Image: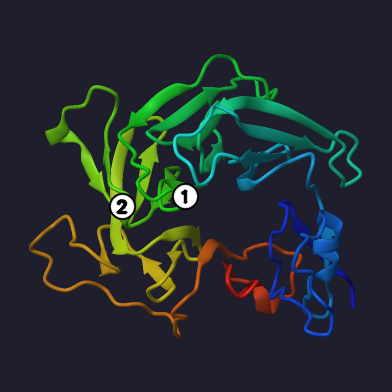
Amino acid sequence: MRAIHLLVPLLLSPILLAQQDPQRPVATTQALDPAGTAARMIVPAGFRVELITGEPTIAQPIAYTQDDKGRLWVLENTNYPESPGQPKDRIVVLEDTNGDGSFDKNSVFLNNLTFSSGIAVGFGGVWIGSPPNLLFIPDRNADAIPDGPPQIILDGWGAEDTHETLNNFTWGPDGWLYGTHGIFTFSNIGTPGTPENQRVHINAAVWRYHPTRKVFERWCEGASNQWGLDWNDHGEAFFAACVIPHMWHAIEGAHYTRQAGSHENPHTYQDIQTIAWGRYEKAGYCGAMIYLGGAFPDEWRNNFFFHDVHMNKLR
């Protein structure tokens, strides 16, 4: 059986069904180093874990993305859980310059962000979620060097609960920039200067922004603290959420069962229940991926993967 590689781009990131080995003692006073973390992960037969990067190259990563050149863009949030915090968060770019499959070059794209939680690359620059703003840093020639200062695309993002603000940036199959937003943070979104009565109110939602038409929408709402969104082969979207049932079929304009509070539309008669098999009462979930690649065996395609933080697993 050929070995199947699973890339581990972020320090202490759990990998496919990874969990603690009960036969191996776990230190209670000292964290494992990046290589030690990867070595302790348990994966199904035929899979293996490779460490891409770790401390000190990156520190406290919260999000990452890859561009069409194969570069890995890592967003650090060393301010967490304080918001807005000091202007010290960074975007680190990792690059394979000789094509041998290893990242041999790293550079800092930006190093003066405050409490940032989402990143995407496309349409001539880098998109960053940094409450109270959605920022765009131009990089028109794609050399991983900013062409100018960050531009405020949208403002009004809240940060009352610092792990439930705008996050999980991903490009949808329709070309919109999608993101998620948790339930105990309250945002009133618009372009700078937009009057209050023309802003879009968000708490517990999936939102989207069109990069060329400059349109912002609350795409669907409800659930809890969603931190993961992806599409399957049929163009259907799914997101993961914490506390309440954890897997949801995302539909434009839908209203989902909420952990708390009320829907924006007070006349919502009935909201949509989960399609998930169950829930954990004290579970924390983040990240979502529907596997559409060609490296895994066929039975893994269109499976929904998400991180189970409290159980140290990727389900």
Q: Position of residue 150 (x, y in %)?
A: 49, 21
For discs 2 and 1, the disc positioned in front in the rendered view: 2
Q: In this view, does 228 lie to the left or right of 185?
A: right
Name which quarter of the figure residue 113 lies in.
top right
Depth check: 33 or 308 in front? Answer: 33
Q: Quarter of the image containing the C terminus?
A: bottom right
- Residue type marked 2: Trp
Q: How far apart are marks 2 and 1 (CA)?
A: 12 Å
Taking the spot 79% from the left edge, 36% from the top edge, the residue there is 95
Q: Where is residue 22 in the image (x, y as percent from the top left)?
A: 78, 84
User: Quick one: label 2, few (<14), some, or many (20+) residues within 10 Å?
Assistant: some
Taking the spot 37% from the left edge, 74% from the top edge, the residue there is 244
Q: What element carries label 1?
A: loop
Q: Position of residue 314 (x, y in %)?
A: 64, 71
Q: Is residue 52 left or right of residue 218?
A: right
Which mark identifies residue 219? Answer: 2
Q: Is residue 220 left or right of residue 300?
A: left
Q: In this view, does 183 lie above or below 308?
A: above
Farthest residue toward the front? 29
Mark 1 sits on what residue? 172
Q: Where is residue 125 in the image (x, y as percent from the top left)?
A: 56, 27
Q: Is mark 2 on a helix, strand or loop?
A: strand
Farthest residue toward the top? 148
Q: In this view, does 215 lie above or below 23?
A: above
- Residue type marked 1: Gly
